Image: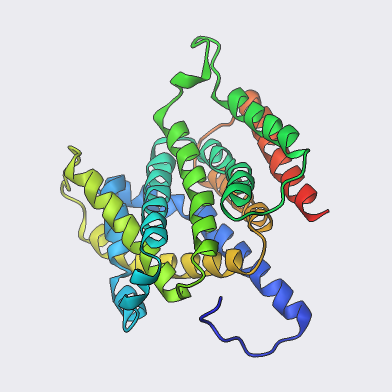
Amino acid sequence: MRSIKQSPRPANSVALLPVFSLLLSATLWGLFWYPLRLLEQAGLSGLWSTLLIYLGTLPLLLYLLRGRYHEFSQAPWLLAGLALASGWCNVAFVLAVLDGNIVRVLLLFYLSPVWATLIGWWFLGERVHRSTLLVLVVALSGAVIMLWHPQMGMPFKSEAADWLALSSGFSFALTNALVRKAQTSSLQMRTATSWLGVMLVASLLLLFSTSPLGEPSLAALLAAPIIGLLGITIMTFSVIYGVSHMPLHRSAIILLFEIIVGAVSSQFLTNEVISLQEWIGGALVMLAAFLSAKKQTE
């Protein structure tokens, strides 16, 4: 990014570092559902877990913002949009993986390459090929197959977790676009803004919800901020660095590795089962994501 001065590295190292950074983030996000479910079992609901986890980033957040408050005035609307998009992305994702099937949630979330293509074209001026329409049809067909239940007659009455996953994926693509657009802001400011946005959205939802704190265990209350300080820090910096150093569509396809990690881990750690219909729909979503990235690099 503009504000980070990098020491000279061989060309291959420069090219591979963003890839490894995104793979690390995808792996950790693919496993993130597990500690969230452990926290829920220990008495912390999704909204409270999210708030406490991101409150754990406050020490580093305040350090990142030190001497940088003036940057907000340089791009206030972009940073405000980044905060809201990142906030909803993370809150919706947490609620989805707590209430829904892990693999199903991840597959629906990762319609994000489709949204990334559209947002990249509209917001960043990135080139879109004519075949994009076909890719969109394939991706949306996969989503409809996954969401449709014969007894309902239409896909628009699916579980809340499905729509949380879809909206989280869209917000994720929008967040990445805003990260790239806000080039006048430092990496530190963009990171801090993303974290503050999650705390803001979680707090607002708690104000208007009936979700009490309850009686969580002391271990859960201590673990949540630690997860934030360590896990969220690594995952956030990894993905922001990666998407800032390569085209939006390419970063989106690399992050699909999260689905593999989530699928493997859920098979070992849960009793969840994916139906044939969901695998077919998911395969179309993955195919569309692959075609999107392949076409954009031709």
Residue 117 in view (yes/no): yes
Question: 286 above or below 238?
Answer: above
Question: 10 above or below 276?
Answer: below
Q: Position of residue 170 (x, y in %)?
A: 51, 43
Specify the color scheme.
rainbow
Identify the residue shown where x is 16% and y is 43%: 212
Q: Position of residue 189 (x, y in %)?
A: 40, 72
105 or 173, which is in the foreground? 173
120 or 140, which is in the foreground? 120
Identify the residue shown where x is 48% and y is 55%: 175
Residue 227 in view (yes/no): no
Count of numbered labels shown in the rendering:
0
The quadrant the N terminus occupies is bottom right
Q: Position of residue 226 (x, y in %)?
A: 33, 68
Quarter of the image for residue 16 reads bottom right
Question: 210 above or below 151?
Answer: below
Quarter of the image for residue 206 reads top left
